[in-house]
Amino acid sequence: MSVASTQTAAEGFKSRFGGVPEGVWSAPGRVNLIGEHTDYNEGFVLPFAIDRRTFAAVSLRADSIARVASSFTEQVIEISVADVSNQTVSGWSAYPLGVAWALIQAGSNAQGFDLFVDSNVPVGSGLSSSAALESSVAIALNELWGAGLHKSQLAKIGQRAENEIVGAPTGIMDQTASLFGVTDHAVFLDCRTLHSEAIALGLKQNSLEIVVMDTNVSHRLVDGGYASRRAACESAARDLGVTSLRDVSVEDLEDAKLKLDPLVFKRLRHVVTENARVLETVKLLKKGGPLAIGGLLLASHESMRDDFEISVDELDCAVEVAIRSGAIGSRMTGGGFGGAAIALIDSSKIPELTDAVAKEFDTRGFIAPTVFSVSADAGARREI
Ligand code: ADP
Ligand code: MG
């Protein structure tokens, strides 16, 4: 793991631009505990911010030039802030420059800046390095430009940057988790009202941890899968005459089955039951704590594997091994087609799990996985 910190970001800033940054802001990646492919259906999600962060060291400039750099590359991208558009920027710089663009669209006064980012959020593993990057830049520029936006508005700024400048049709979950994270809590988000509530996870009291099993299978390879699932959800909503699948209940499924194409019905059933599982998870966490939610995590995985069909062999294998190693619950997390699975497991069983996953992946000829624990951390903040 890279050792990114406030200090490494400030040092990187100094070596690329010279001098000391005006400040360093950071924002975490996230793990979605439960609630997959529900965000764009105006449903419920329950992510938490993790103890892996992106650090943005930033200074304002006297002119209107933006210069952005990252520890990932030697490149320094330079552009006049007023010229940023989806035509003029591409690649990784579209995330930070897209945030600047979205703030300007929201009425902020544009001023030039130098920005250097360093991060220890794994990229492309479904832990949302993209939202960590957007959110760290969003809170930095919000402060430096005196924009005065609240966190919920900044979440939309990050989403807009990703949708319109990067060109990825993602929901609002990742940015919300990254901005609203609370130590030892998950962020329950209603994606229709955008109301969020911190829910105590109670892991430490129960000597539990959440382990990420990154399959190292890139989810980028099958971008079409995400779009086709979204299209199936839209088609189900249209056929059922509802604005979004949020409005379909578990009780409605029997009727819906008669009306829908069998494949579209399976996609619908995942979303509807997943929303119910998120609500039930929140209820159980409030009532009895995390030991009670294992069955819901596994049911969520099975629904994604069988009904939404977004799992892959590596993810199914990680989940099976986790359960065999004594996890009380396990599921793939993130958009699917690769990325990571999580396991909720007693701390004492983690070495056994780590070993078992590595062995099973090797036996089955999969690329070696990366297994590590995460804890629920605080959201975006200024560091210095
Ligand atoms: P995920 O959000 O699951 O990690 P995405 O594909 O949504 O995967 O976002 C990853 C992209 O975000 C990277 O390919 C890169 O363009 C950009 N990115 C994330 N973190 C950084 C960083 N610290 N420096 C430069 N680019 C980054
Ligand atoms: Mg992302």
Image (cartoon, rainbow, N blue to C red):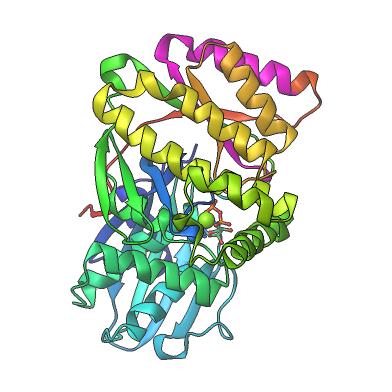
As for residue 245 lying within the magenta part, the answer is no
Determine whether 77 is above or below 360 in the image: below
In front of the other: 237 or 252: 252
In front of the other: 108 or 42: 42
In front of the other: 132 or 57: 132
Determine whether 207 is above or below 32 in the image: above
* Magenta part, dominant SS: helix
Residue drawn 61% across the image and 25% down it: 319
Asked whether the viewer can see residue 14, the reply is: no
On the picture, is 251 further left or further right than 357? left
Residue drawn 60% across the image and 12% down it: 324
Q: Quadrant of residue 317?
A: top right
Residue drawn 20% across the image and 55% down it: 384
Asked whether the viewer can see residue 154, the reply is: yes
Percent coordinates x, y for residue 168 in the rendering: 57, 67
Percent coordinates x, y for residue 230 in the rendering: 61, 61
On the picture, is 378 further left or further right than 54? left
In front of the other: 80 or 369: 369
What range is drawn magenta here? Answer: 337-361
On the picture, is 318 further left or further right than 271? right
Figure disc tally: 0
As for residue 345 lying within the magenta part, the answer is yes
Percent coordinates x, y for residue 371 in the rendering: 55, 27
Residue drawn 52% across the image and 62% down it: 170
Determine whether 368 is above or below 121 in the image: above
